[in-house]
Image (cartoon, helix red, strand yellow):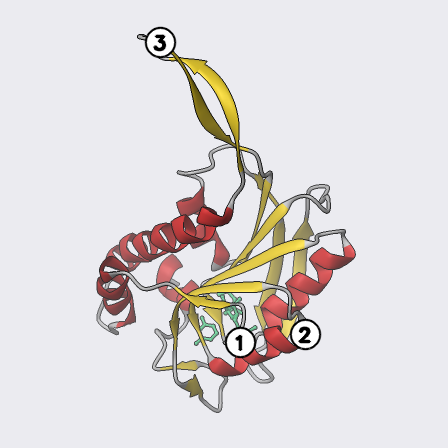
Amino acid sequence: MKNVIEVRHPLIDHSLTVIRRKETTTEEFRRHAGIVSKILLVEVMKGLGTANVRIETPLSPMTGRKLKDEVVVVPVLRAGLAMLFAIQDFLPAVSVGFVGLERDEQTAQAREYYRKLPKILASHQVLVIDPMLATGGSFDDTVTLLKEKGAKRITIVSIVSAPEGIKRVQKRHPEVKIFTAAIDDHLNDRKFIVPGLGDFGDRYFGT
Ligand code: PRP
Ligand code: URA
């Protein structure tokens, strides 16, 4: 699939299996969701630009590299927070914007209840993070909103994706790259991902 990167790693396979199991506790779920998020995000950030920088080690001057791209991370509340905690270890000063969306349980349509975004420039590398890409409505709405705010370089990162949601995002935003740890089989009639892992937000936050 064009612009879709399914990130494979033995540690992802292991941790993803833990978070999929229905008997996994909240504590284990958080820990392993953190591991999957970190490995995924390291892969996403391989694409960031760097520039030469002159430094001195205790022994000699040398040319090192520093990050050049400015990153804005946009977690989709609430479940996206799980991935924000992971990215902050790598980019402690990253600029963060928030979009709060909640799916209506009957219609599966996302409703926006919160928005707080920093100024976004065309040069910014914008990472939209949300662990579940189901119908794609939440990512679609968030990317549309970010484009209206001036974002030009957008990547989305999910842990588990459904083919239906990927198709929707690809159709609406063909230039956007999608990184995911798993492409599952289908959505059920309640628009949950199958086999999936259930409701990520409820399991991660213990609600
Ligand atoms: C979940 C999930 C995504 C959305 C995915 O959020 O975290 O945001 O559903 O579904 P979609 O692709 O069909 O839009 P939910 O509405 O359960 O809210 P929460 O994050 O607060 O748990
Ligand atoms: N949101 C979730 O948390 N899980 C799904 O399977 C679909 C949407």
Q: Image quarter for residue 68?
A: top right
Q: Are marks 2 and 1 in contact (CB under 8 Å)?
A: no
* 36 over 94 or under it: above or below: below
Label drawn at residue 198: none
* Badge 3: residue crowd in 10 Å (few <14, some 14–19, many ≥20): few
2 vs 3, front mark: 3
N-terminal of the two: label 1 or label 3?
3
Disc 2 within 8 angstroms of ligand 1 (CB) = no
Q: Amino acid at mark 1?
A: Ile
> At 26% from the left edge and 55% from the top edge, which residue is drawn?
27
Q: Residue at x 76, y 52 (%)?
A: 149
From mark 1 to mark 3, how far is it between C-alphas?
50 Å
Residue 199, picture quadrant? bottom left
Residue 67, position as x, y percentages in the image: 51, 33
Q: In this picture, is 152 found above or below 197? A: above
Residue indicated by mark 1: 166
Q: Amino acid at mark 2?
A: Arg
Do we see residue 17 in this rendering? yes
Q: Nearer the viewer, residue 68 or 112?
A: 68
Q: Secondary structure at mark 3?
A: loop
Ligand 2 falls in quadrant: bottom left
Q: Amino acid at mark 3?
A: Ser
Above or below, comparing residue 135 to residue 65 in the picture? below
Q: Which residue position is annotated with label 2?
A: 172
Mark identifier at residue 60:
3
Residue in the foreground of this view, choosing between 199 and 57: 57
Q: Secondary structure at mark 1?
A: helix
Q: CA distance from mark 2 to mark 1?
A: 10 Å
* Most foreground residue, 9 or 82: 9
Secondary structure, mark 2, is helix
Mark 1 Cα-neighbour bin, 10 Å: few <14, some 14–19, many ≥20: many
In the image shown, does 37 or 98 lie closer to the viewer?
37
